[in-house]
Amino acid sequence: MRMLQGILALIMVFGFNSHVYSWTCVYVSSYHKGYAWSDALERGLRTELDGQCELIQFNMDTKRNKSELYKIRKSREVTEEIRKIKPDILITSDDNAARHLVVPYFKGGSLPVVFSGINWTVEGYGFPASNVTRMVEVAPVRPMLMWAQRLTGRGTRGLYLESDTLTEAKNLKHLVKVADDLNISISSALVDNTAAWQSAFNEAEEADFIILGSSAAINDWDKKTIVSFVRENADKLILTNDDWMLPFPC
């Protein structure tokens, strides 16, 4: 909710007034419908902008389609549609929309852009720009790691188990940095399918705890199968920062 309120406040910076209902807003999600994070953000935008502007949405689906060629082609496709629509403002969420859409096609232009959900830092994107402002996403990894130490009796070894995506690579980088400050060693397993996820889970023998990232890029993921698997095989503390992964930790 705080992120959504911030996004709306930033949109107001670009000059919305009492007649905003006649404006057109384009929202580009980096990911796909059915991904809990994106769905929640979409619901919030639609609720808060209802009656304020016509909201047109595009989903880039880059969580499940991870090749650079796909991202480039999809960005060009969406850019062509945006230019036809000629919106009053462009709203984006998460890294891939920023990297592949905003930076090459809209940064420094006349169209106001508000982005959200870029993980940890905008380094490398050149934001903020003259027409771009932001909400950066920072996960509460320090308190999570401190609780891991407390619950495991000062455990010093963790495994980060996650799908293999740009977002999770960024998350891992910052997780390791925070863990170093707490004298915790973090190993990682970034996987593409359920079998690899299960294998990495079972091979985490030396870890004192396991941290689960998002499973959204694992296309054969089945919640019931994984819940059953974790219940049968878990023998250590499991943590997560993602509320949609809460059925799995124990």
Image: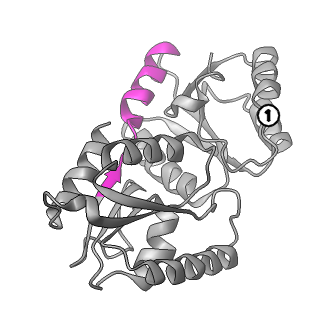
- 116, 50: nearer the viewer: 50
- Residue 183 quadrant: top left
**Residue 189 appears left or right of 246:** right
Reading the image, the residue beneath label 1 is 222
**Residue 125 appears left or right of 29:** left
- Residue 223 quadrant: top right
**Residue 43 appears left or right of 20:** right
Q: Does the magenta stretch include residue 157?
A: no
Vertical relation: 78 (above or below) 11: below
Q: Is the magenta stretch mostly helix, strand or loop?
A: helix
- 111, 2: nearer the viewer: 111
Span colored in magenta: 135-152
Image x and y of residue 80, in percent: 53, 84
- Residue 226 quadrant: top right
Quadrant of the frame with the N terminus:
top left
Helix, strand or loop at mark 1:
loop
Image x and y of residue 175, in percent: 46, 44
Q: What is the image's colouring? A: one colour
Vertical relation: 211 (above or below) 214: above
Image x and y of residue 13, in percent: 15, 62
Quadrant of the frame with the C terminus:
top right
Name the residue: 66% across, 45% down. Answer: 216
Name the residue: 43% across, 16% down. Answer: 150
Image x and y of residue 191, in percent: 74, 49
Residue type, mark 1 in image:
Asp
Q: Does the magenta stretch include residue 149?
A: yes
- 103, 1: nearer the viewer: 1
Vertical relation: 201 (above or below) 72: above
Name the residue: 76% across, 15% down. Answer: 231
**Residue 186 appears left or right of 82:** right
Q: Residues within 10 Å of mark 1 (few under 14, many from 20)?
A: few
